[in-house]
Amino acid sequence: MIDTNKVRDDRETTEREGLRDYQTKILSAIQANINAMFEYADAVRHARSVPELVDVSTRHSRRMNERIREITGAAQKLTIENAPPLTGGHPFGRMP
């Protein structure tokens, strides 16, 4: 017989660990974005020409996109790992 309390406790532990990992990634991304913002502002201030400004902006945008992908991946991982198992039945019971 399955010990439902143990299963529930294990699931809750897994959910907490997943949420903690996601929160850590979010906080890391926030710090990285703050640092990147100041680096970008400094680089823009020192740009000597329009092409250099475009290059600085392009590099900054690429870094932001990489961080967005990291956060999105972490959110997907959290969702997949903590989604309830599919039982094969309809969520509203029997359909007529």
Image: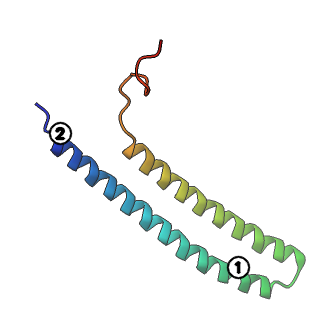
In the rendered image of this protein, does residue 4 appear above or below residue 88?
below
Where is residue 7 shown, x and y percent of the image?
20, 42
Which residue is pictured at 66% across the width and 83% down the height? 38
Q: Name the mark nearer the viewer: 1 or 2.
A: 2
Which residue is pictured at 78% across the width and 82% down the height? 44
User: The residue under label 1 is which amino acid type?
Assistant: Tyr
User: The residue under label 2 is which amino acid type?
Assistant: Thr
Mark-to-mark CA distance, 1 and 2: 53 Å
Q: Secondary structure at mark 1?
A: helix
Which residue is pictured at 42% across the width and 51% down the height? 78
Q: Secondary structure at mark 2?
A: helix
22 vs 66, left or right, is left
Q: Nearer the viewer, residue 57 or 29?
A: 29
Q: How many marks?
A: 2
Q: Residue furthest top?
A: 96
48 vs 79, left or right, is right
Q: Nearer the viewer, residue 10 or 63?
A: 10
Where is residue 35 shown, x and y percent of the image?
59, 80
Instruction: Choose top left, top right, bottom left or bottom right for residue 72.
Output: bottom right
User: Dot 1: within a 10 Å radius of its alpha carbon, few (fewer than 14), some, or many (20 or more) residues?
Assistant: some
Q: Nearer the viewer, residue 14 or 6?
A: 6
Where the N terminus falls, by quadrant? top left
Q: Residue furthest left?
A: 1
The residue tagged 2 is 4
User: Dot 2: within a 10 Å radius of its alpha carbon, few (fewer than 14), some, or many (20 or more) residues?
Assistant: few
In the rendered image of this protein, does residue 41 appear above or below residue 16?
below
Q: Are marks 1 and 2 in contact (CB under 8 Å)?
A: no
Of labels 1 and 2, earlier in sequence is 2
The residue tagged 1 is 40
